[in-house]
Image: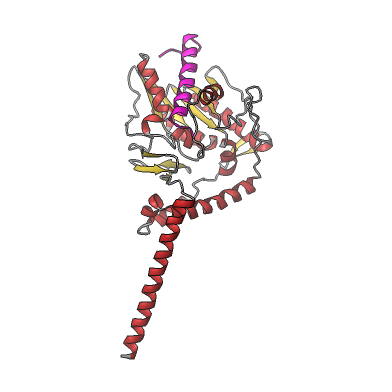
Amino acid sequence: MKRLSRKKKILFSLALYFLISCICLLVAEVAIRIVCPQSILPRFVENTTWGIRKVLPNINTIHKTPEYSYRYRTNSKGFRGTKEHEIVHPESCFRIVVQGDSVTLGHGVKDNETYSYFLEEMLNEDGFRAEVINMAVSGFGTAEEIIQFHEVAKKYKPDLVILGFFQNDPLNNAVCGLFTVEEGVLCRTEDDFIPGIYLRDRLYAIPGYSFFSQHSHLFTFFRQKASSVVLRRLRKKTEFHSTPIEETKEQNKGNATNQNALLTKLLLRKHVDDVAQTGAKLLIVDIVDKRLKSCFPTDVEHDTNTMAISTYDALKRSRDEGRKPFYEIDSHPTAEGHRAIATCIYEALRDEWASETWPSI
């Protein structure tokens, strides 16, 4: 009887501790939601055999922050939206592949509100038969986009590649360690860059982890803190420093510093050459941030197969007209911002085709 009573006491104590812990976690969850609501933006990515990340296929989830809530979906290849794209190039169709990071992927907007979607819509409404494939991956820089082009994008035989460049790309290029500069020459390292995927895959095997990662503000709070620590260490390791430019058009030139600026410039040059070798055209789109600032190295050499444009004027005009092209807290463009970017791209393409610098559709 005494032993049984002791066991009961132990079980009662454990149950009590469990109940108190659950209550504490519940109170903390409610407090975080009220005082410091988190952005629920799980990144559904996986490893690849070529050493970088790719977006998981057939995702259908909700991305939610204090500023927005939208449905996020990918097709069977992990490209944004539900539309499927055959590898075989469609006849009498101008195929455009779009590469970039979370801005291009469309964090903050619906599938039909990305600048890739708007661009396809604009081209088709104007009488062109165009197909635009959004292959962006959150967190990508130019280094990963070069590898993605070789392993994925060029298999679709695009007529045009659009590269969305954002001001954190130089940081991503330095942190990933996929390329280095040795005596002024770009060199591919033997490293892979799949941050956190090994750990994440094992965490997702734990029952309930997936649910909490998609719904709990408390869980997201601690996960973001852990991610910030890792990112700070990576930044310190690469000794990256970025000096944004002033908000004037004349000064809107690249200013990521020293070795990292050189690395990004050489990566862009390589992307120019790699795309040209396939016979496709390349359009580099410098997407300024919500302060209308950029780190794009404007002295990148390129040939007649490549064009570089800035979204500065389009996004500034949208902002000045009160259309709010960016979220106030989040750094990503709104649907209005994506429409402005798409309009900027469309007008640049229309002008080039009209001047017959590039072949028309």
Whole-percent x and y of residue 205?
37, 57
Asked if residue 334 lies in the magenta stretch, the reply is: yes
Looking at the image, is 113 positioned above or below residue 213? above
Give the quarter of the figure containing the N terminus. Answer: bottom left
Looking at the image, is 193 positioned above or below residue 186? below
Whole-percent x and y of residue 238?
63, 45
Q: Is residue 279 visible?
A: no
In the drawing, does residue 169 fall left or right of residue 246?
left
| Closer-to-camera residue (326/266) | 326
Q: Main secondary structure of the magenta part?
A: helix
| Closer-to-camera residue (60/159) | 60
Whole-percent x and y of residue 42?
42, 46
Q: Residue at x 51, y 40 (%)?
A: 329
Quarter where residue 208 is shown: bottom left
Q: Residue at x 50, y 26 (%)?
A: 322
Quarter where residue 359 is shown: top left
Read off the magenta span: 332-361
